[in-house]
Amino acid sequence: RVVEIPLGMLLGFFFWFFLRYGFGGFYTVGPSERAVLTTFGRATRVDGQTTLNDPVSASLRDDERERYAYPQVRVIGPGFYWKLPWQRVHRVSVATRTVSIAYDPEVPDANNGGQVLEAVTKDQLNIGLSGQLRYAVSERNLYAYLFGVKNSLAHVMGYFMSILRDRIANFTAPVAPVALAAPGDPVADVIQTISINDLRGHLRDLNENMNVECASAAARYGITFDAALITSIDPPGDVESALAAINTAHNQVSSEIS
C-alpha cells in the first residue's frame, strides 16, 4: 500500500529546509576575526603544507619541529559567505588582548584573583609578581589554536607561568662592582647576594628574556605573545622592611666612604 504524504507537510518540510540550510547557511566574518571551515569535522587544508614550511616555526628547536608540525588550513578573512549544511564555521578573534600575568582561565580565583603570581627565588624567598601580558591568536597557525589543545589560552598561560617561575628560581645577575664600596664591605656583600635586588635591578632584562623564551608559543599553541611586562616584584612585608634597612645601611656606608 502506497502512503500518500500530504502536500502541506511536504511544502512545510521544503520551507523549513530552505530556511535552516539555505538562508541559514550564510555567515559573516568580522574585521577582527578569522575563520576556519570544517567539512564533516575536517578542516579545509592547504595541500602538502605544514607549519614547518612557514616562518612561524622558525623559533622551534630541532627536537621540537616534528612534534609541532601542524597542517596549514585555509583561513577565511572578513566578509560574507555561505556554507553547506554539513559544514561548520570556527571563528576566532585575532585582536590583541591584555591579561594579568597571574590570570588562570580555568580557575579565575587562583593567584589572588589573577592579580599576583607567586614564585620562589634562588635564595628561597617567596615573592609576588605583578604585570601584564599582551597576546593575540596567530593567524598563521589557527589549526593549533582551534584543534591542537582543548583550551589553548589556559595551556599557554600555564606554559608562560612555568617559564617565568623557572627564570625567577635560577636568575643570576651579571657580576658588577658596587659603587663606592670598600673591599670586603659586609653590607655590600649582603646586597649582592640578595636575589630580589638582582631581579629588581634587572627587570628589563627579565622581560626581554621572557619574550625570547616565549617566541615559540605561536608555533606550539597558535598564540603569539606580543609583550610580557613584569611591573613589580614584591617580597613579604617583613622581608621588605629588612631589605629597606639593609639598603639604608649601605647608603650610609657609601656616604661615609665618599
Image (tube, helix red, strand yellow):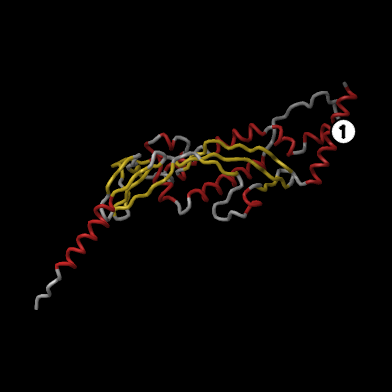
User: In the shown orientation, is residue 240 left or right of residue 218?
Assistant: right
Residue 206: x percent and y percent? 63, 35
Is the residue 192 above or below the residue 26 in the image? above
Residue 76: x percent and y percent? 33, 42
Q: Which residue is more in the foreground, 49 or 232?
A: 232
Residue 228: x percent and y percent? 58, 37
Image quarter in which the C terminus is found: top right
Label 1 SS: helix
Q: Residue at image x 66%, y 51%? A: 112
Is the residue 192 above or below the residue 121 in the image? above
In the rendered image, which residue does mark 1 sit on?
Answer: 249
Is the residue 224 above or below the residue 8 in the image? above
Q: Which residue is more in the foreground, 124 or 226?
A: 226
Which residue in the rendered view is the most extreme toward the bottom?
1
Given the image, on which type of amino acid does mark 1 rest?
A: Ala
Is the residue 22 above or below the residue 177 in the image? below
Image quarter in which the N terminus is found: bottom left
Q: Residue at image x 81%, y 39%? A: 243
User: In the shown orientation, is residue 118 left or right of residue 213?
Assistant: right
Residue 52: x percent and y percent? 39, 39
Q: Residue at image x 28%, y 51%? A: 25
Q: Which residue is more in the foreground, 86 or 125?
A: 86
